[in-house]
Amino acid sequence: QYEWALGADSRAYVFVESGAVAADPSAFETSDLHLGYGGGLRFLTGDATSLRAQIAGSADGHVGFYLQLGAL
């Protein structure tokens, strides 16, 4: 993840990740890894509250938009 400040109370970020799910550690195969990527904006609205808007996708073609309001 790479993050940078846009202003005193706002940040932008981009990320790339990879992962897989297996029933147990011995079933893990690197060929099962899936790539994910995305980016977003984070706004601090107080000492412990934030608003985050993020768009993320995968190499499989899935795309999602996420909006989160919550405590840090």
Image: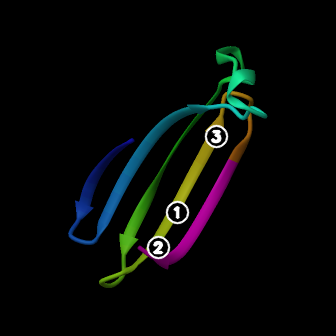
Residue beneath label 3, please?
A: 57
Q: Secondary structure at mark 1?
A: strand
- Residue drawn where x is 69% and y is 14% of the image: 31
Apparent side of residue 41 relative to residue 20 in the rendered image (left or right): left
Question: Total of numbered circles in the picture?
Answer: 3
Identify the amino acid type marked 1: Ala
In terms of secondary structure, what is the magenta stretch mainly?
strand
Magenta range is 64-72
Q: Quadrant of the N terminus?
A: top left
Identify the amino acid type marked 3: Gly
Q: Is residue 28 magenta?
A: no
Q: Is 33 located above or below residue 15 in the figure? A: above
State yes or no: discs 1 and 3 in contact (Cβ < 8 Å). Answer: no
Mark closer to the chain start, 3 or 2: 2
- Residue drawn where x is 54% and y is 56% of the image: 54
Q: Is 2 located above or below residue 11 in the figure? A: above
Judge the density around disc 1: few (<14), some (14-19), many (≥20) Cα neighbours within 10 Å. Answer: some
* Residue 51 position within the rendered picture, expressed as x and y whole percent measured from the top left: 46, 73
Residue beneath label 2, please?
A: 51
Judge the density around disc 3: few (<14), some (14-19), many (≥20) Cα neighbours within 10 Å. Answer: some
Q: Secondary structure at mark 2?
A: strand
Apparent side of residue 63 relative to residue 15 in the rendered image (left or right): right
Colouring used for the render: rainbow
* Residue 34 position within the rendered picture, expressed as x and y whole percent measured from the top left: 66, 28
Q: CA distance from mark 1 to mark 3?
A: 14 Å
Residue beneath label 1, please?
A: 53
Q: Secondary structure at mark 3?
A: strand
Judge the density around disc 2: few (<14), some (14-19), many (≥20) Cα neighbours within 10 Å. Answer: some
Apparent side of residue 53 relative to residue 60 in the rendered image (left or right): left
Q: Quadrant of the C terminus?
A: bottom left
